[in-house]
Amino acid sequence: MGYEDIPILHYLGIAVDILLVWYVIYKLIMVIRGTKAVQLLKGITVIIVVRMLSQYLGLNTLQWLMDQALTWGFLAIIIIFQPELRRALEQLGRGRLFSRGSLPGEDDPEITVEAIVKATDYMAKRRIGALMSIEKETGMSDYIETGIALNSMISSELLINIFIPNTPLHDGAVIIQKNQIAAAACYLPLSESPFISKELGTRHRAALGISEVTDSLTIIVSEETGSVSVARNSELYRNLTQDELREILQKELMVASKPASSNRWQWRGKNNG
């Protein structure tokens, strides 16, 4: 007599089976959460919704197009998601796919805000060049892999030490995920916009470049002038004060925890030319 013949064990087996499937799906979502695959999955969801609506409304041509997209979509997913699939398999091999979540305090944006403001103020006064990019919704794992992995809790002292001239990690960008410095000495794509002022150097072009392909917030400290700039959504905001930088960071990183502050900041100092 198998367990199927015992109703309680049968239903218990079904429940365990469903829970295991959902747990695997949840962990896979956690793996791709910090990558561009999230945006692609949103696009696939839109296609599925349009397919269902077109069937319900009797839009045969649109339904046929969505069917073709879904039919060939599996092959496209394998090609498009190749880096993410490789990363997931690597994490599975290291035993990290089912590792624990974030530590307490890792999701508190105030820690990141204060660390960046304090470090930026110190470096600006001493004209120490710096480039710090904060990951938001669009993952930056591809750019993190170009640098030196740190995975360290963020602090102003660590940021300052990274950008001290003639040290191994000072050349390149720091990428910040939540309250962690994910990597240093990272390579960011340079903007090819013809409207960028000729007086701007590689750091500013890299900051604009990453803002063109992600929704990240990037802070630049000029080595020549000590001025502080922020790149966001393909725009560059220059000559910011310490208070303005703090307000920008609070608006962008703490909007979920402080909704009332979302309308306080009006972007000023925009100047690409």
Image (cartoon, grey):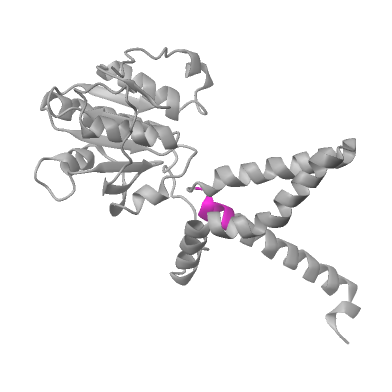
In this rendered view, identify the residue nearer to me: 140 or 60.
60
Query: In the rendered view, would you say 267 is above or below 79?
Result: above
Tell me the quadrant of the picture where the N terminus can be found: bottom right
Q: Main secondary structure of the magenta part?
A: helix
In this rendered view, identify the residue nearer to me: 97 or 64.
64
**Can you give x and y, in whole percent of width and height, for residue 241 in the image?**
25, 16
Q: Which residue is drawn at 43% across and 30% down?
A: 253
Q: Residue at x 41, y 43 (%)?
A: 106
Q: Does residue 21 appear to the left or right of 260 in the view shown?
A: right
Does residue 99 appear in this view?
no
In this rendered view, identify the residue nearer to me: 225 or 108.
225
Residue 105 counted in the magenta span: no
Query: In the rendered view, would you say 2 is above or below 111?
Result: below
Report which quarter residue 59 is drawn in: top right
**Can you give x and y, in whole percent of width and height, for residue 28 in the image?**
57, 57
Q: Does residue 269 appear to the left or right of 18 in the view shown?
A: left
